[in-house]
Image: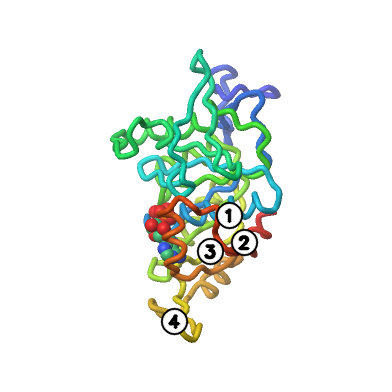
Amino acid sequence: MSECNHDCSSCGETCEKRDFLATPKDSTKIGKMIAVMSGKGGVGKSMITDILAVNALRKGYKTAILDADVTGPSVPKAFGITEKAYGNSDGTTIYPVESRQGIKIMSMNLLLSDDGDPVVWRGPVISGAVKQFYTDVLWENVDYMFVDMPPGTGDVPLTVFQSLPIDGIVVVTTPQDLVSMIVEKAVRMAEMMNVKIYGIIENMSYISCPHCGEKIYPYGKSKLNEVAANFNIPVLGALPIDEELSSLVDKGEIESVGDYLAEATEALK
Ligand code: ADP
């Protein structure tokens, strides 16, 4: 069928590769959409999403973050955002909140009256909300959008890949993570969803000795290069465990982060 409206009952055909992409606002314009994934929570995926967005902004790109980690939305806090998102009077459009330096952000915590309120919703409702973060939010003039995915390869990541025009993924792992398995799952999902894998970033890779600068590997030497070579995907960088990073997140000052992940940022072009 030449004009697919994504409703298979309208033409009677069941296409092998159906296109489920959601329709955004007319004036939404997003250049590149990059999803940041991890195998489990707490590996620094959100912080790395934030750093990649800050780097893109510093390079002069109009940048946005869609926080799809609905039950653990930490992006607004890292940017020190306390205001809430608002919509137009007929409720058809939500406006993203801008960080101090101008990164457009949408996150569940920008909609909850109290940041401490838990999101106790079933999977399909959460997936619906994430889809609305794309369809109902006005994303005007965005060069790079980073999507902070919930951990794993479940319901919400599936919705994101089916409904949002994701260009590619960045996988975040830590040395104690089961790197090979995490990478394999991400690679397989990306293949199934037909999206590019930009590469892997290893977080909490090492600690730099504060006295002599020597690198200490608390989890043993990284196997990342080996695993990346096995799956034929690039290593985009490694971040140390650094108290400065966690304190910038805690203080809401991630936009003051030093020069981290420059190589990863180049690779996303
Ligand atoms: P995830 O999104 O994978 O659940 P977060 O980005 O929320 O993980 O990070 C979990 C916690 O670990 C946060 O408090 C964050 O500031 C901290 N953290 C992440 N990476 C580092 C690092 N390299 N050094 C120090 N603290 C880190």
Q: Circle 1: is it few (<14), some (14-19), or many (20+) Cα within 10 Å?
A: many
Query: In the depicted view, which residue is nearer to us: 265 or 15?
Result: 265
Query: What amino acid is at disc 4?
Result: Ile
Which label sits in the foreground, 4 or 3? 4
Q: CA distance from mark 2 to mark 4?
A: 23 Å
Query: What amino acid is at disc 3?
Result: Ile
Q: Circle 2: is it few (<14), some (14-19), or many (20+) Cα within 10 Å?
A: many
Q: Does 224 appear above or below 95? A: below
Give the residue pinned by disc 3. 201
Based on the displayed image, in which of its 4 quarters is residue 107 positioned?
top left
Which label belongs to residue 52? 1
Q: CA distance from mark 2 to mark 1?
A: 8 Å
Q: Does 54 appear above or below 226? A: above
Query: In the depicted view, which residue is nearer to us: 56 or 36?
Result: 56
Task: Answer whether residue 39 is visible to the viewer in this image.
Answer: no
- Which residue: 56% across, 43% down? 100
Task: Answer whether residue 171 is visible to the viewer in this image.
Answer: yes
In what element is the residue under mark 2?
helix
Q: Are marks 2 and 1 in contact (CB under 8 Å)?
A: yes
Q: CA distance from mark 4 to mark 1?
A: 25 Å
Query: In the depicted view, which residue is nearer to us: 9 or 245?
Result: 245
Query: What amino acid is at disc 2?
Result: Ala
Q: Nearer the N terminus, badge 4 or badge 1?
A: 1
Q: CA distance from mark 3 to mark 2?
A: 8 Å
Give the residue pinned by disc 4. 216
Which label belongs to residue 11? none
